[in-house]
Image (spheres, rainbow, N blue to C red):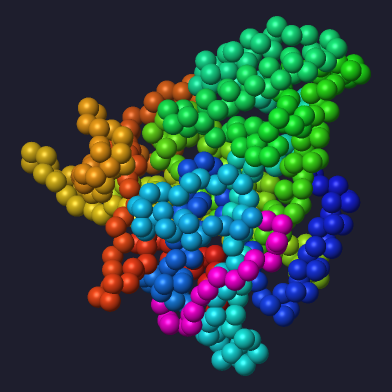
Amino acid sequence: MPALTSLTDEARIALDTVTGRAANLFSPSLRLGVSGLSRAGKTVFISALVHNLMHGGRLPLFEAQKSGRIAKAYLQHQPDDAVPRFQYEDHIAALVQERVWPASTRAISELRLTIEYESASAWNRMFSAGRLSLDIVDYPGEWLLDLPLLGKSFDQFSREAFELAELPVRSELSAKWREHTRSVDPDAPADETLARRLFETFADYLRACKQDERALSTLPPGRFLMPGDLEGSPALTFAPLPSSGQPAKPGSLRAVMARRYESYKTHVVKPFFREHITRLDRQIVLVDAMQAINAGTAAVADLERALTEILECFRPGRGNPFIDLFSRRIDRILVAATKADHIHHTEHDKLEAIVRRLAERAIARAGFSGADVEAVAMAAVRATREGTVKNGRETLPVIIGTPMDGETIGDETFDGKTETAVFPGDLPDKPSQLFKANGVHGDQHETELRFVRFKPPKVEESAEGLKLSLPHIRLDRALQFLLGDRLA
């Protein structure tokens, strides 16, 4: 990919890194980035991670916990006062007390969890206090979709946007925007009302792509979907235009759109990359692969495209001690397929193989740089249990849980109170079946999951009436990969 930063950016990144390394000598810390596209479960993952560590959850694959070396884990004030705090207490209350899923990530937030532990090494116990501060940085995956824009000109961005919009799975959704674009002269003098109408029709098209029935993922610019306090600003009021191959005329619509695009990169995307992405030590990317599978092979192909572009913008690898003083590298990346509790455990290996296939190009690149990359099928909070039902002579594996109010299967609509058993269907035996050439045309693959959203589980209580930790699937495996070596 083209360079995402200038020499000035790199100098500022180096200064930040040196400052952080100096602080780390006295107070060891690890910055973990948590991201994923909409409804992949970022908020739930962070809440479950913290809750299980603070409440001694069942984590048999997390070696430090299994061996009893973690003395305690507790929340502390985060180091970055300018970043909103991740509202852990509110999210846990929603999960445990109200049994509703917490609101999706809308902006960046941070939380510091300090873990006091005993090293497994007698030598390390002599020289280390056995304390690690885990700084968890939560940010919308849609913002990650913007990072590839740093290496693209306005013309390149526009060309790729039109190519995507003309794909069969998107053509109907983008028709109004494309028709509107064809009716304007990009080289005519700029008009603010026209610029805004173009932006609005383009943003409407992106939002339509995001709906469940399409479940498309490659939707830059990401802030068009989550503008926050930038809504209505000129930096967020632009849209792609067909390229003429000639330099834009001063004062023309094309010139204004190109200038705003560059402002968007300079004032929105680059600070996010420089101040947050380049400071990460570890990264987990959560993927709702089953939603894409349910929507068809075109959605799966689009998710693969988005994941590849996102993962290529991280800085994976391992340097030497001198280089590490000035430049952080993400040395471990976990790509996690979420909502594994929505299918039977016999299908989990297939789901894991699918997410590895989705990210294989980026995984190969990161592995070449020296970073460790893993894929896992998990559920940070397990909302179902498993069982079997008889269907004639056939015994079917099912999942049992309480579907959320309004969820439907066939003609049945659930009330949010009734527990039911669901046969979710079978994933393809080979991931390649989801990546057939006809997938780009939006054709439905042979397998259709019976996918419904379940309410969070009722958390068990101890004999003393204390709430136990949240149930999960392979959260311990994720923790071991992301943190295990730092607690050894």
Q: Which residues are magenta?
A: 66-83
Q: Is residue 230 left or right of residue 431?
A: right
Whole-percent x, y for residue 458 in the image: 29, 57
Q: In the rendered structure, does residue 72 fall within the stretch colored magenta?
A: yes
Q: Percent position (x, y) of residue 374?
A: 52, 57
Quadrant in which the N terminus is drawn: top right
Q: Where residue 268 sits: x, y (%)?
A: 75, 41
- Residue at 71% x, 57% y is 82
The quadrant the C terminus occupies is bottom right
In the orientation shown, which residue stands out farthest toward the right?
250
Residue 147 visible in the picture: yes
**Quadrant in the rendering for residue 382:** bottom left
Q: Position of residue 140 (x, y in %)?
A: 59, 45
Q: Nearer the viewer, residue 231 or 40?
A: 231
Count of marks, rendered view:
0
Residue depicted at 58% across the width and 44% down the height: 106
Q: Judge whether residue 244 can be spotted in this image.
A: no
In the rendered image of this protein, does residue 260 appear above or below residue 306?
above
Above or below, 291 against 377 in this view is: above
| Closer to the camera in the image, 416 or 181 | 416
Q: Is residue 104 magenta?
A: no
